[in-house]
Image (tube, rainbow, N blue to C red):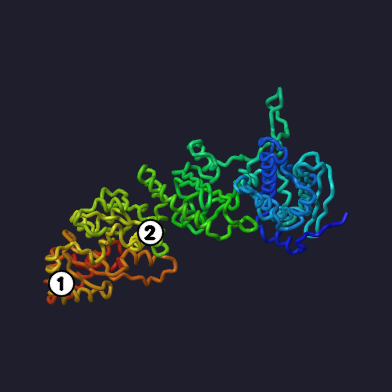
Amino acid sequence: MAKKQFKAESKKLLDMMVNSIYTNKDIFLRELISNASDAIDKRYYHALSGDNSGMAREDYKIQIVLDKDARTLTVSDNGCGMTDKELESNLGTIARSGSMDFKAGLENKSEVEIIGQFGVGFYSAFMVSDKVTVESRAAGDAEGHRWVSSGADGYTITPCDKAEVGTTVTLHLKEDTDDEKFSRYLDEYKIREIVSKYSDYIRYPIMMDTETEVPVEGDEEKTETVVKPTQLNSMVPLWRKNKNEITKEEYDTFYQSKFYDWEAPLHTIHSKTEGQISYDALLYIPAHAPFDYYTKEFEKGLQLYTNGVLITEKCAELLPDHFSFVKGLVDSADLTLNISRETLQQDHLLKIIAKNLEKKIKSELEKLLKNDREAYEKFFAAFGLQLKFGLYQGYGVHKDVLKDLVMFRSSNEKKLTTLSEYVSRMPEAQTAIYYACGETADKIDLLPQTAAVKRKGFEVLYCTDDVDEFALQMLHEYDGKHFTNICADNLDLETAEEKEALAKENEDAKDLLTFLKDSLDGAVDAVRFTGKLQDHPVCLTSEGMLSLEMEKVLNAMPNANGNAKAQLVLEINREHPVAATLKALYGTDDEKLKKYAKLLYAQSCLISGKPLDDPTAFSALVCELMV
């Protein structure tokens, strides 16, 4: 019996198949089960078309047998089987796919779902075995044939007795090494784990004889071990059922068991898309953020299936960063996979799915916001920060997707509000959306500027997250209304007459204001009188794009050198008695005036939340002035 050589004629090619293309040895079983499923599909298709006799669909199955003594793992099916010529053609030529050839010959390629299309999955068996035996009998043939190979050295094909139509693949597992324990593939638990992960939704039963402890008849205190056939897969994917056939409890149970969450999801999205690319999607919005969600260790991504077979555990390309909290899966037979089926090729179809999912997620979140405010606010408490990061990232490229989903605490009853709701409440005279930044809403509410804006009848957004102001500046405007930081020097609440009178007063007091600025040794860029503070004597504002809050955030970042510096303005209430005191001291007691300048600056820092450079000096100054 002469040994035949692979038509690829390259030991190097098979070595590459075994050692380079696949990164996870467990997938050999996925590939063999997928091939078995394809073989059954072909036989069933021929039976329906009347080409040859077949069985009822429920009679088809895939069988796994473990033999620890012989160190063999066997995968059998009662599918179409192969003739000797087909064995040589399909298994003797590396990278030739009989499944692909079969599908190419169909007039309507959607009639049957074929998983394997590359012809290399079978050779993944050599990752874990040093010898592979295939016994196959084609439907209509009287005898079977045996294909045997120990790898790249070649293979033999000989006749054999095989009672049933179908194929049996036997792997003779490699011996264990210090680095690899191939014996694990003889453990029932390991096989269950692999089938559950990769092949749970194969359309035919995957059977295996398993050992089970049962009570001894007549003596319930004793048990005995019996071997009984067990189905390892659930067969029918939940996402392929009609939505009206699935209960909320089924959705929730699937999510909690599949994605290891102790809490039911907040919202479920189940969709079926047909067209340029067809796919099923089952997505979940968790009720809480994972413990590592806002860390570098968190990995986003959806599970990707093709015809119910898991291809990758986390396909990051299917989710944008701003929706990275979504868990779930996508099942499509239309994607172009690479030769190992472990990763996707970057083609336009994948991008189409990702874009469609983004639109779907946004639409579902908008519905949740409209129909279940309490649930949406719970969602936003967990993942709202990510939406705000999404507004800022990419120079605002995603702002149209996210602007109606973000929320901020507001001076309107200090409740969360959307930008749309804020604008809907704006008085006709209001032209800007006002916001302020701080540690908490209560502290922001105490700012002198907040009182000034609220006195005008305008609402203030309380920005308490570090990213808030960056996000709003990137958004720039909403519904034609620009965002205005109430702690900026250009708040613009005065009438034209008030502005004119204030400008004249600042011009008349120019020398005094310059003296006060110089007394602060560069701590501020300007000192001005203002008319917007009713009861408060002083406040600290900023000029330009960089606000005081942004300065804090930037300087608190890792590797920050402290160079971020806002242009600060000390504003003094023109109508407060302290203004008259300052004017009276100028030119009569300049030393005391310098001390007052430092005192007012320190007060403005405390009000705005800016840390004092020297709290001890401030305390001493207060005591000195008191005495």
**Quarter of the view holding residue 488:** bottom left
The image position of residue 353, as x and y in percent, is 50, 54
Question: What is the quadrant of the N terminus in the image?
Answer: bottom right
Residue 495 rendering spot, x and y as whole percentages: 14, 63
Q: Are circles 2 and 1 on residues that touch, CB within 8 Å?
A: no
Kindly identify which residue carries mark 1.
506
Residue at disc 2, secondary structure:
helix
Task: Please tell me which of labels 2 and 1 falls first in the chain.
Answer: 2
Q: Residue 7 location in percent, x, y? A: 77, 60
Mark drawn on residue 556: none
Label 2 crowd (10 A; few <14 / some 14-19 / many >=20): many
* Residue occupying the point 23% across, 70% down: 598
Q: Nearer the viewer, residue 411 or 28?
A: 28
Residue at x-position 50% and y-position 40%: 251
Quarter where residue 9 is shown:
bottom right
Which label sits on residue 399? 2
Q: Residues within 10 Å of mark 1 (few under 14, many from 20)?
A: some
Question: Is residue 76 visible in the rendered structure shown here?
Answer: yes
**In which quadrant of the rendered view does residue 57 lie?**
top right
For marks 2 and 1, give the CA distance: 40 Å
Quadrant position of the C terminus in the picture:
bottom left
- Position of 409 with respect to 198 (left or right) is left
Q: Is 378 on the left or on the right of 87, as rendered? A: left
Please report the residue visible at 22 percent of the width from the left and 63 percent of the height from the top: 491
Q: Amino acid at mark 2?
A: Lys
Outermost residue toward the right in this view: 1
Residue 335 vertical position relative to residue 61 in the rendered view, above or below: below
Tag 1, which secondary structure?
helix
What amino acid is labelled 1 in the image?
Answer: Asn
Residue 190 seen from this side: no
Q: Nearer the viewer, residue 178 or 154?
A: 154
Comparing 65 with 624, the one in front is 65
